[in-house]
Image (cartoon, rainbow, N blue to C red):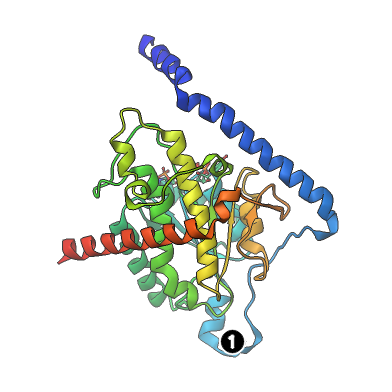
Amino acid sequence: MESTVTEAFHFVCSSQFWRMAIFWTLSLIISYLQSFAQRFVAAQSKSFVYSSPPSLPQATRSVPSATNALRTPICIITGATSGLGAAAANALSMKGFYIVLAGRSSDLLAKAISDIKRQHIGALVKAFEVDMSSFKSVLKFKNSLQQWLLESNLHSSVQLLINNAGILATSCRLTPEDYDEMMATNYIGAFCLTKVLMPLLENSPVPSRVINVTSFTHRNVSGMPVDNDTVTGKCFSRLNCYPYAQIYEYSKFCLLLFSYELQRQIGIMEKSHQAPENGVSSIIDAALAPPEITGVYFFGGNGGTIRSSALSYSTKLSKDLWATSCDIFLELQLASTGTSA
Ligand SMILES: NC(=O)c1ccc[n+]([C@@H]2O[C@H](COP(=O)([O-])OP(=O)(O)OC[C@H]3O[C@@H](n4cnc5c(N)ncnc54)[C@H](OP(=O)(O)O)[C@@H]3O)[C@@H](O)[C@H]2O)c1
């Protein structure tokens, strides 16, 4: 009991606590003010709410196998066993998606499946065990997914990828590659998963979409480099005090830069990213938005979008982060080939 009180006291006295209490509150207020101002100016008629999953273009309706497969577009959700991921899985299942749940625990995945099926009897749901902080696990997931699509006679493509898994770790933990676990889960895992799933996303006969679940806290990032040491979080493990609030903000900032760069690099895909402060509604808005709505930051529900921080629109920073992330991806690929050889 005494140690719990002491721990709580230390927590409240820490700079990280005050950073979250003050800066995070301020950045949330700024986001809401922006959202209200935007809605006021845009007026009700310009907001959008969509209710259907992407439909097949007329031309592909004549291909029976593809038609069958794509009557139920596939949506992958990482971190789908609780919170926003589970809520999004439920909601999107109701909208007609074939939901692929990606999570760490087989028990929690089984529970998530039965929760969805209880609410929606005809739901199409499949689950895979994936640890987003592990490149090996991400690769294994991609292979199992491809195998499953083949065996289930489904079209070899993915229509929607929601990179939702995320953690706020208050102490330093390292992955087997010595990467910071929070950076590995929140950013590197999402980058690598998107990369390895790119052929399936690009193979979709209807516009595919990637949703990166970011956070208003990205607004607090300024002057952080995007080199290998920082993106892998190795530099943080050398510090005496683990700056977890800053690392969380930075991981979400990287996810935003990645979203914008993905948008610039791959013209054929539709991408969105969003902040989930209004529960699951922003995720659903992003998932069901029409193809022309792309590269935007959803906030506040009812289809609302706002601008992310000024720094997140830096093309140079996005390009530098992209280059660093590709190097990390290559590093991980080489290491995994070495391990499996
Ligand atoms: N809730 C908010 O107000 C808020 C605000 C801003 C941003 N966000 C972001 O929204 C996302 C969802 O947040 P939430 O509030 O719904 O959190 P949550 O309830 O803690 O859910 C996080 C999910 O991510 C999964 N996860 C964690 N590490 C993982 C890993 N290594 N591999 C695979 N899955 C992993 C968790 O699975 P396990 O059960 O296995 O741990 C869980 O299903 C996060 O990215 C978060 O940063 C949330």
Q: Quadrant of residue 206?
A: bottom right
- From the viewer's perspective, tell me whether residue 203 is left or right of residue 128: right
- Residue furthest left in the image: 341
Q: Position of residue 195 (x, y in %)?
A: 40, 66
Q: Residue at x 38, y 76 (%)?
A: 151
> Residue 307, relative to residue 202: is it above or below?
above
Location of mark 1 (residue): 60
Q: Position of residue 16 (x, y in %)?
A: 46, 27
Nearest the viewer among 142 and 308 is 308
- Give the residue type at disc 1: Thr
Secondary element type, mark 1: helix
Q: How many marks?
A: 1
Residue 127 appears in the picture as rendered: no
Nearest the viewer among 287 and 66 is 287
Q: Residue at x 14, y 67 (%)?
A: 341
Nearest the viewer among 189 and 222 is 222
Q: Position of residue 217 (x, y in %)?
A: 55, 40
Q: Position of residue 228 (x, y in %)?
A: 33, 52
> Residue 4, relative to residue 251: is it above or below?
above
Residue 128 appears in the picture as rendered: yes
Crowdedness of circle 1 by 10 Å Cα count: few (<14), some, many (20+)?
some
Which quarter of the rendering shows the N terminus? top left
Q: Residue at x 59, y 43 (%)?
A: 216
Q: Quadrant of residue 218?
A: top right
